[in-house]
Image (tube, coloured by chain):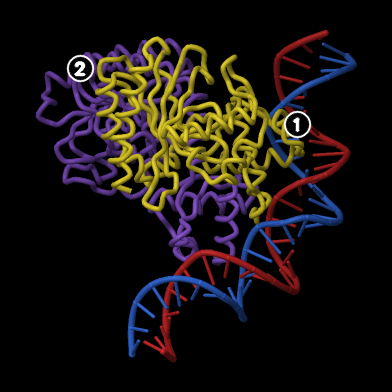
Chain colours: A yellow, B purple, C red, D blue
Amino acid sequence: MQKDGEVKIKSLKKSLEVLECFTQKQPLGVTEISEKLGLYKSNVHNILMTFTAMGYVEQDPESGKFRLGVSVMTLSRAFREGLNIAKIALPFMREIANEVGELVYLSIPRGDEVVYLEAIYPDNQRMVSKSVIGECSKMYCTSVGKAILSQFSPEEMERCIEGKLEAFTEYTITDKEKLREEIEATRIRGYGLDNMEVMFGIKCVGVAILNYEGKVEAGLSISAPSLRMGEERIQEFVKVLQTYAGKIQKML
Amino acid sequence: MQKDGEVKIKSLKKSLEVLECFTQKQPLGVTEISEKLGLYKSNVHNILMTFTAMGYVEQDPESGKFRLGVSVMTLSRAFREGLNIAKIALPFMREIANEVGELVYLSIPRGDEVVYLEAIYPDNQRMVSKSVIGECSKMYCTSVGKAILSQFSPEEMERCIEGKLEAFTEYTITDKEKLREEIEATRIRGYGLDNMEVMFGIKCVGVAILNYEGKVEAGLSISAPSLRMGEERIQEFVKVLQTYAGKIQKML
DNA sequence: TTAATTTGTTCTCTATTGTAGAACGTCGTT
DNA sequence: AACGACGTTCTACAATAGAGAACAAATTAA
């Protein structure tokens, strides 16, 4: 998933891999992790004890199992603080949400995925309780993902779609050649579409946000039930997204 | 700040300390970090390269300086996912926010600080753009902090106030004996007060949320400008907070 | 323009330290 | 009572993290 050609401290890499196990399941035991990663129990134990002492992992005194600790929150807050794209985009996202009355997402690329940074709900709509902030999706099946891919160089793009194209719904594009055509079509029309490729019944429109050098900085998308995503509304959404993406780009 | 008696992997501890530098300032250079922590540049460089390869740190190709990377978001999301207190408390927090029309916070203790997990804004009020989620404050000067301290054992409590009591406003309690009295008063009355001790013009009321064993699990608080925080309203807020804290506690 | 300073980066050697492997104590289960 | 699964502890060896200097690139000063 990550290029590890530049890993200098193997123990740190290993430790982070241990930590990342918790993103898939919580709580986890020492044995469980050691089996998953092929490490020795004592090794995993030492890593977990260190993380625990630093607040990145907590141990349930009853079961002895581990889960992530509070300290990760402080990091994520600092990350968002330091990222000016979020600061700049947030007020615009609110305007978009109120204008179109649908969910608006800001996401940024990481490897072959997009990570959701912010999600804004229109004022009148009840906020869904499960926040997607920090969640990630594969690029090849999302609207922003395809919008971003269409702005990449051919090599970058290929690197992002080299893995297996897993089908999440019957609409997911799993054929690599089809996908390349779709990305090319995305590039030409200037926005990405997700036609229920991630979740049945949900469609999305997304555009890429480029910085002054033309490099992809982030992505902006609108998500809605397919019933509210007819061709006319899609065009309306696209127009709004492109307008605001332009405004944001000017400020980067 | 953290007990490091149980640190088994020194290089990991060191690496995390490097990572934590970014919570104070971003971006940071190799030299800057090495000076701050008293480490060698090559050491810091190796650490940063490894973090970069894993996505926890990003390097600006222009300046060569570093900032936090996207991967920390995935961790924080997993943390919040795994923490059922947030899942349970969130819908109640919405009710509170709409009932009282003020800002409602959920926070959890970490060392001598409280970390803000969730912040809910009343429907009619515009959400402030800067999210405090992940931010932390010292216990001794916040309403939740004092509510939590008042539920701790004397030893735990002392450990949390052993540092210097920094004054953030002229109202901050900086005398340790005064603070002990205030915490005792908090314990008796059942809720904590922050009388502009963190920020001038802002008052808070807070209560602790205990689990079935009576251990502090989290804290709930309401924050508002002091003009909207007269004695009658404080009593109203306290009543609401205690009612909902009770509901949440039953579900833990 | 050139010199001086500061930056991130690279290198090498070796003492540190992470870790394999087994053994231990403690649960809940059979 | 015996088992199995768990988190934990221990030790000895070898891998490797890190000190320290030297590097190149970039910035500033003269």
Identify residue type, mark 2: Val
Q: Position of residue A47 (x, y in %)?
A: 65, 42
Q: Is residue A242 visible?
A: yes
Give the left or right position of residue A36, taking residue B32 as reference. right
Q: Position of residue B24 (x, y in %)?
A: 38, 51
Q: Quadrant of residue A164?
A: top right
Q: Is residue B187 visible?
A: no
Disc assigned to residue B100: 2
Asked if residue D12 is positioned above or below residue A189 in the image, the reply reads below
Q: In front: B149, or A167?
A: A167
Q: Quadrant of residue D29?
A: bottom left
Q: Residue at x 73, y 34 (%)?
A: A34
Q: In front: A227, or B174?
A: A227
Assess disc 2: are there few (<14), some (14-19) or many (≥20) residues with their C-alpha within 10 Å of its C-alpha: some
Q: Residue at x 37, y 48 (%)?
A: B163
Q: Secondary structure at mark 1?
A: helix
Q: Secondary structure at mark 2?
A: helix
Give the left or right position of residue A171, taking residue D3 as reference. left
Q: Chain of mark 1?
A: A
Assess disc 1: are there few (<14), some (14-19) or many (≥20) residues with their C-alpha within 10 Å of its C-alpha: few
> Does label 1 lie on the same chain as label 2?
no
- Whole-number angstrom distance, CA of label 2 to CA of label 1: 50 Å
Asked if residue A123 is positioned above or below residue A153 in the image, the reply reads above
Judging by the rendered image, the residue that carries numbered circle 1 is A35
Q: Quadrant of residue A103?
A: top left
Identify residue type, mark 1: Glu
Give the left or right position of residue B19, taking residue A38 as reference. left
